[in-house]
Amino acid sequence: MELTDIADKDIWVSKFKCLTATLEDVARQKAILAQNHQWSDIENLPKQDQLVFETWNAIPNTYINMKKYAFGVLSIFGSTYVCEQVFSNMNYIKNKYRSRLTDDSLQACVKMKVTYYSPDVQTLCTEVQEQKSH
């Protein structure tokens, strides 16, 4: 019932058509930037998954079953990808030359491999006390 009701409302149909156009535009921009080797500019483009989730979040809670179903379907692919990535990294870390790693060491190595961390070197350098000459 929720699906037919949402498909009948012009506001939601136009919202999803707008989402489709926006996603196509972002994909087009990403292809152009990649073709011109402007990799840093690709990061400034809107995230496609964020656009999709924002659109679904905009739908009122009267369509709660549709939202739950959509979020469930959308999360399947991301979680499967992350799971496969972790196992792939774990196999790379614990190879035949490093087979004696303990579970704790392996867990720490996997966390370091799959976690994105970019330290702010400028801030860290300003906080460190310089070594005084004697």
Image: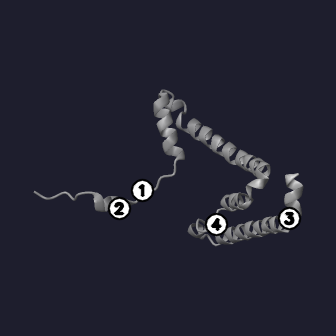
In screen coordinates, is 115 left or right of 76? left
The residues bearing labels 2 and 1 have C-alpha atoms spaced at a distance of 9 Å
- Label 2 or label 4, whichever comes before in sequence order: 4
Secondary structure beneath disc 4?
Answer: loop
Q: Which of the labelled discs sits on residue 9, or is there none?
A: 3
The residues bearing labels 2 and 3 have C-alpha atoms spaced at a distance of 51 Å
Q: Residue 107 in the image: state x and y as whole percent.
A: 50, 35
Q: Residues within 10 Å of mark 4 (few under 14, many from 20)?
A: few
In screen coordinates, is 35 left or right of 73? left
Amino acid type indicated by mark 3? Lys
Q: Which residue is mark 4?
A: 46
In screen coordinates, is 131 left or right of 2? left
Name the foreground residue: 35 vs 19: 19
Secondary structure beneath disc 3?
Answer: loop
- Label 4 or label 3, whichever comes before in sequence order: 3
Q: Residues within 10 Å of mark 1 (few under 14, many from 20)?
A: few
Q: Residue furthest front?
A: 62
Nearer the observer, disc 4 or disc 3? Answer: 3
Name the foreground residue: 71 vs 78: 71
Q: How many numbered marks, from 0 up?
A: 4
Q: Which residue is mark 1?
A: 119
The residues bearing labels 4 and 3 have C-alpha atoms spaced at a distance of 27 Å
Rendered position, 101 above or below 80:
above
Q: Residue at x 37, y 60 (%)?
A: 121
Nearer the observer, disc 4 or disc 1? Answer: 4
The residues bearing labels 4 and 1 have C-alpha atoms spaced at a distance of 23 Å
Q: Which residue is mark 2?
A: 123
